[in-house]
Image (spheres, rainbow, N blue to C red):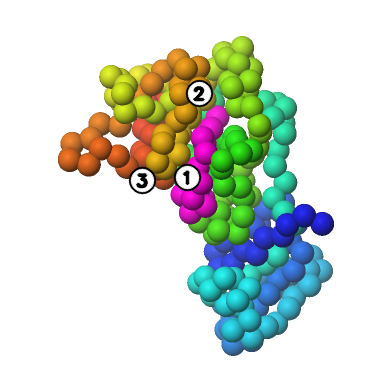
Amino acid sequence: MGKESIIYGRRVVQEVLNSKIKVESIYISKNVKKDKILGILEYAKKKCINIKEIYNSDMDVLCDYGVHQGIAIKISEYKYFKINEIIDNIDTNSNDIVLILDSIQDPRNLGSILRTAEIMGIKNVIIPQKRSCGINSTVWKASMGSLAYLNICRINNIINVLSKFKNMGFKIVATSLDSTSSLCDINYNFPLILIIGNEEMGIGEDLLNHCDIKIKIPMYGNIDSFNVSVAAGIIMYEIKNIQSRY
C-alpha cells in the first residue's frame, strides 16, 4: 500500500466526500458536536465507510496538531494522472490553460495555487518529479479540497512535454522579472501553457528558453517580488479575465 493522507477540517472533508476520491476511514473526536457533522456521518454509513471515534488528544496527533474541527478522513496516496490523460482531456479548439508549476517546494503554497487554479477553471496541472513538493496532507488542507477536482500529473521531463503542447498549437507563457511585457499587455486568445516558478529562484533557464511569451506583473512599490501563491493568483485571474473578452 502507498502512503496514505490524513485530511482534516469539515469543509475539506466534505469536498473530498463529494468527489470520486475513495475514503478508507473517517475519524471523529469523542467531544465533537454530532449535529455539526451529521451529513458526513450519514454519508459514511451510506457508503459503509469505517468510522473511528477517538479522543481529541489523539485527533490532534493524527492531524499533526492542525485545526481539525473534530473530523478527519484517511485516503490512499494521491493517484497522479498520466500525461496522455491530461492531453486527452484538453479541448484544443478553446483557449484552454494548462498550468505547470516549476519546483514549488512549500506545500502550503502549492495547495493555495491549486485552490486558485480550480476556482479559475484551470483543471490540468503538471508538476516535476524532482525538486518539487508532491501531494500530501498539507497540500490537501491548503487547497481546501480542490485537488479532488483537478487533473494533476507528475513527470520527469517537462521540456519534452512543452514540445508536445507546442505541436498541439499551445503557446508557452512564463513569468520573468526581466520581461518587458506586462501581464496585462497580451490578449491570450489562444490555448496556452502557463509556467509559474518556485519561491526563490523563479523559473529555470532551461524552461524559459522554450517560452513563447514572457510576462511580469506590474509592481508599484519598493519590493520587487510577490509570494508565489499570490503571484499565481493574480496571473491566473488576469489571463482568464482577458480571455473572457473573446
Question: Can you identify the residue that label 1 sits on?
Answer: 113
The quadrant holding residue 12 is: bottom right
Quadrant position of the N terminus in the picture? bottom right
Secondary structure at badge 1 equals helix
Marked residue nearer the N-terminal end (3 or 1) = 1
Q: Residue at x 74, y 75 (%)?
A: 51
In this figure, what is the number of numbered marks? 3
Q: Residue at x 31, y 23 (%)?
A: 178
Cα distance between the residues tagged 2 and 1? 20 Å
Looking at the rendered structure, which numbered label has been put on residue 180? none
Based on the picture, tell me whether residue 107 belongs to the magenta stretch: yes
Q: Residue at x 51, y 35 (%)?
A: 102
Determine crowd level at label 1: few under 14, some 14-19, many 20+ residues with C-alpha closer than 10 A.
many
Q: Is residue 121 above or below residue 211?
A: below
Secondary structure at badge 3 equals loop
Determine crowd level at label 2: few under 14, some 14-19, many 20+ residues with C-alpha closer than 10 A.
some
Could you tell me the amino acid type at mark 1? Ile
Q: Which of the two residues, 15 or 103, is positioned nearer the viewer here?
A: 103
Which of labels 3 and 1 is toward the front? Answer: 3
Marked residue nearer the N-terminal end (3 or 2) = 2
Question: Can you identify the residue that label 2 sits on?
Answer: 207
The residues colored magenta run 98-111
Question: Can you identify the residue that label 3 sits on?
Answer: 227
Counting from the top left corner in percent of width and height, residue 53 is at 70, 82
Residue 246 visible to the viewer: no
Could you tell me the amino acid type at mark 2? Leu
The quadrant holding residue 39 is: bottom right
The quadrant holding residue 130 is: top right
